[in-house]
Amino acid sequence: MPFTFASQLLERITTHRVCTPTILQMEAVECGAACLGIILSYYGRIVPLPKLREDCGVSRDGSKAFNILKAAKNYGLNAKGLKVPFENLINLPPPYIVFWNFNHFLVLEGFGKKHVYLNDPATGRRSVSLEEFDGAYTGVVLVMEPGAGFQKGGKKNNIISALIARLHNSWGTILFCLFAGLLLTIPRLAVPAFSQVFVDEILVQERQEWLRPLLLGMILTAVLRALLAKVRLIYLRQLMVKLSVTMSGKFLWHILRLPVGFYAQRYAGEISSRVSINDTVAEILSGRLATTVIDAVMIVFFLLIMIQYNLMLSAIAVGFAAINILALKFISQTRVDTNLRLAQEQGKVYGVTVSGIQTIETIKASGLESDLFSRFAGYYAKALNVQQELGLQTQILTTLPVLLTSLTTASILVVGGLEVMSGKLSIGMLVAYQSLTLSFLEPVNSLVNFGSTLQELEADLNRLDDVLQNPIDVEVEKKEEGSRQKVRQPPSWTPLDARCFMPGNPFASHLRRETLPQCWLTTALAPLCRETRPPQWLRFPAMGDCRTRSLKAFPKGRAVGRRDFSLSTIAQDSFQLQGYIELRNITFGYSRLEPPLIENLSLSIQPGQRVAFVGKSGSGKSTIAKLICGLYEPWDGEIYFDGIPRRQTPRSVLANSLAMVEQDIFLFAGTVRDNITLWDSTVPNADFIQACQDAAIEDLILSMPGRYDAELIEGGMNISGGQRQRLEIARALVKNPTMLVLDEATSALDPQTELIIDQNLRRRGCTCIIVAHRLSTIRDSHEIIVLEAGKVVQRGTHEQLWQQGGTYTCLIKT
């Protein structure tokens, strides 16, 4: 491409440059959605970034140009993708989206003679040289303009509204602090009066008898001011602590309830760094916001008094104050964008640092220390550059009020002196007015500083709202709804069979007509009407040895006696499922705008069976395992447990019945017991020891100092990879699940240890879903399912598949 020709053309012609609003991406893969938001906002349609994320089908792999165009058309834009040479870009009316370096979307605002003006969702508005743009431009352009169906609308987030919304349940303290602050204005209003009396009456008129009352009044005023300030500060401090605890707790609780997909596209360190933002917000709400309201009232009070003294001098003071406020307005948007960029860059620095330390063994083994440091230094340099840019803007805002205050004081002295010489003011009135002016400018400067703080805070609030605006996991929401309505039953639940209440039934006198799932009636409770012992699988956690209470009170595995069985207070947390799993026409993918990864998958697994999924990497094995565990929601179809749809099964029941061992092992700094039980003190010691034995980890634990209370360092770095894997298996077994999902759970174990664990799992009789590549792990499964690109290509036992040949045989041989 003849770059010289393009340069000459651009030197002769300068196109119209537009100014688009800044929308910064919160994660690396959503640049396309952010660019669409910039274009929509430019034309007057405000759409939240989380909504655009969904519309553009942003997944772990980002979004495609086709999906961005499709979303733009849904909003009424005439959108099309073009292949345009660099020298012809000047003919396209901006703004439009360009594909950059084959991995990024950004908005082009126009051309200058030597620069190209861009709005980058990763860094904000910036300009690059023609040479740099030419080197990164890929030739792909997404052109968008309003069509016939385009409608303006939407509402931009208001920072004041966002702050006020966080003050619920705190208005009593806020109003008290405001009242105390208003009382503080009385002593401040008295100071100019004292000054005027001192000059005009005591100095000029030589009324010395006024001196003692004046001094007494000034002392009392100072004491009153100190007491009011102390009371106000005490309440403001209490308010800050309350808001900090409330907002941080709410934020962290929301993070814990978000779906797994939220974490797949973000740095863990960057997410955790946002928690501390709540403390900053709480400090501003408790101190600066209340003070600012008082300052606004004080400005009005002082201005009214100043006008009573002299209108001309008041106009001078108001004029300089207006310049101060206009300067803040002039650079406000730039500071907002810069602050958001700084927050994001600092979050990236923190995220890279945390992830590097977490993988330090791999980095050292590969000799990549310098590469990690270079990556850290790159992010840190970007953060420093943005910080310097913000520092320059802050210095301007900090210096300007001081300069304007000095100019105001000088102007009032000059003009006021002329007024004194003309007889319109006395010397005492000029001194009092000077004091009033300083009192007037002080809250004005405070308002300007608060406006500067709001600009910095807006970026932080955007990062908080990026988390809080994401909907929580439907499984968690279902559990919370169930806790609010404790006896809420799905439509598939039905009253107990009438036979259970017939006089001949030994439990008739202890049973009441309660409602339980239909399948639990037919498979579990109906036998109770005929037998004196429940089925073997019907087990309950040990919570004491109560009679005639909830089934939750019975020791696990103990038969239920006559006087023990009462359903009047039965708890959903007590039940364990039998272990029957059925997948009916499951369809799922990571982006709804892309073809599904898994389509129309059906499968049924009987209680106690072992089913294995095999296939190449990326074939969908782990995805199916996570679908069964409820970490992902299928697009279509349904997953059934014991004949009940998963959506209608209480989450607590699933948690008691289903456990998963993933490829990635997480061990935290703490004791072995805490790592296995996850701080659940209700786990019986017998179950804890049995889980360690079945995971073949008990011998190791007993050899460690402190045994079960031995300390593990973060990540379990003081034990081997195989030992960490066995601890993870013990964690899954500690609640005696009836269904177990093993995703490469024994990949780090030697064949002998793997065989021991396999035999222990078979003895438990739980339903097992296995994702593995090792033949010894899967060959004895009741059914082996072979996947390719999310599709089932073969299924059967090992012998059947081996005889068939095909994909399974190739996988085993390789």
Image (cartoon, rainbow, N blue to C red):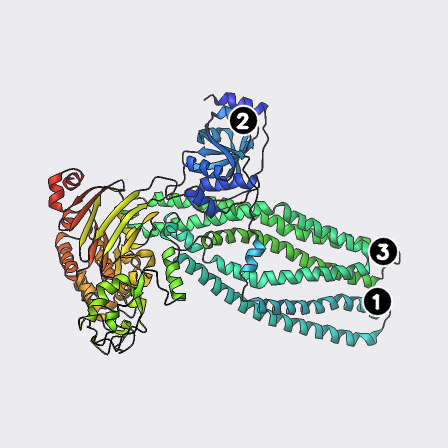
Q: CA distance from mark 1 to mark 2?
A: 73 Å
Which residue lies under the disc numbered 1?
Answer: 200
Q: Can the viewer see residue 734 in this picture?
A: no
User: Percent position (x, y) of residue 664?
Assistant: 28, 52
Which residue lies under the disc numbered 2?
Answer: 90
| Tag 1 secondary structure | helix
| Tag 3 secondary structure | helix
Which residue lies under the disc numbered 3?
Answer: 419
* Residue type beneath disc 3: Glu
Who comes first in sequence, dot 1 or dot 2?
A: 2
User: Percent position (x, y) of residue 350?
Assistant: 41, 51
Q: Is residue 620 above or below residue 406?
A: above
Q: Residue at x 79, y 58 (%)?
A: 307
User: Percent position (x, y) of residue 561?
Assistant: 21, 76
* Residue type beneath disc 2: Ile
Q: Is residue 588 above or below residue 806?
A: below
- Which quadrant would the N terminus be assigned to in this image? top left
- Which quadrant would the C terminus be assigned to in this image? top left
